Amino acid sequence: MLKKPHRIYAGKRIKKNLFLKIDYWNDLIEPTKGKSTKEEKEAFRANINSYLGLLKHYKTYNLRKKMIDVNLDNYFLEYFAMPNNFEKMILLK
C-alpha cells in the first residue's frame, strides 16, 4: 500500500495477483468458449468481485477499468455487466 497525501494506492502484490487471476480465467475458458457452466461463471464472478471489493477501498478506478477493458477476454462481457464505477460484476441471466 502506497500512501500519498489525500489518496492511497493498492500495492504491487494486489495488482500482480489480480492480473494473474485474470490470465488464469482467460486461459481456462479459451478451449471451452461458449460451453462454460453456470457454476464456472458464478465462480469467476465471485473471484473477480472479491478483488474489486478489495480495490474499491483504494484510488484504483483506472486500474479496475484497465482490468475489464484490456485484460479480460471479450467472452466474459457477453455474460457479465459492470456498473459505471467498476466496483462489482453482475452475472446476466
Image (cartoon, helix red, strand yellow):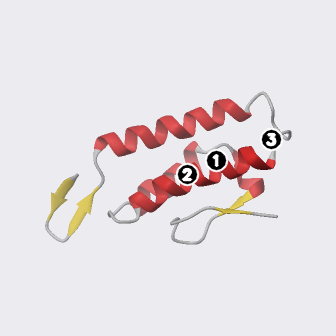
Q: Which residue is mark 2?
A: 48
Q: Amino acid at mark 2?
A: Ile
Q: Residues within 10 Å of mark 1 (few under 14, many from 20)?
A: some
Asked whether residue 19 is in view, the answer is yes
Q: Which residue is mark 3?
A: 36
- Residue at the extreme front of the image, as rendered: 39
Q: Amino acid at mark 1?
A: Phe
Asked if marks 1 and 2 touch (Cβ < 8 Å), the reply is yes
Q: Quadrant of residue 56?
A: bottom left
- Position of residue 41 measured from the top left corner of the image (x, y, whole percent): 72, 49
Q: Residues within 10 Å of mark 3 (few under 14, many from 20)?
A: few
In front of the other: 49 or 61? 49
Q: Is residue 90 above or below residue 44?
A: below
Q: Quadrant of residue 75?
A: top right
Among the two numbered marks 3 and 1 on one chain, the one whose residue lies closer to the N terminus = 3
Residue 18 vs residue 3: left or right? right
Asked whether residue 75 is in view, the answer is no
Q: Which residue is mark 1?
A: 44
Name the residue located 42 percent from the left edge and 54 percent from the top edge. 63
Name the residue located 60 percent from the left edge and 71 percent from the top edge. 83
Give the number of the disc on residue 71. Answer: none
- Residue at the extreme right of the image, as rendered: 35
Q: Residues within 10 Å of mark 2 (few under 14, many from 20)?
A: some
- Position of residue 31 measured from the top left corner of the image (x, y, whole percent): 78, 27
Residue 85 vs residue 59: left or right? right
Residue 7 vs residue 60: left or right? left
- Position of residue 93 measured from the top left corner of the image (x, y, whole percent): 82, 64
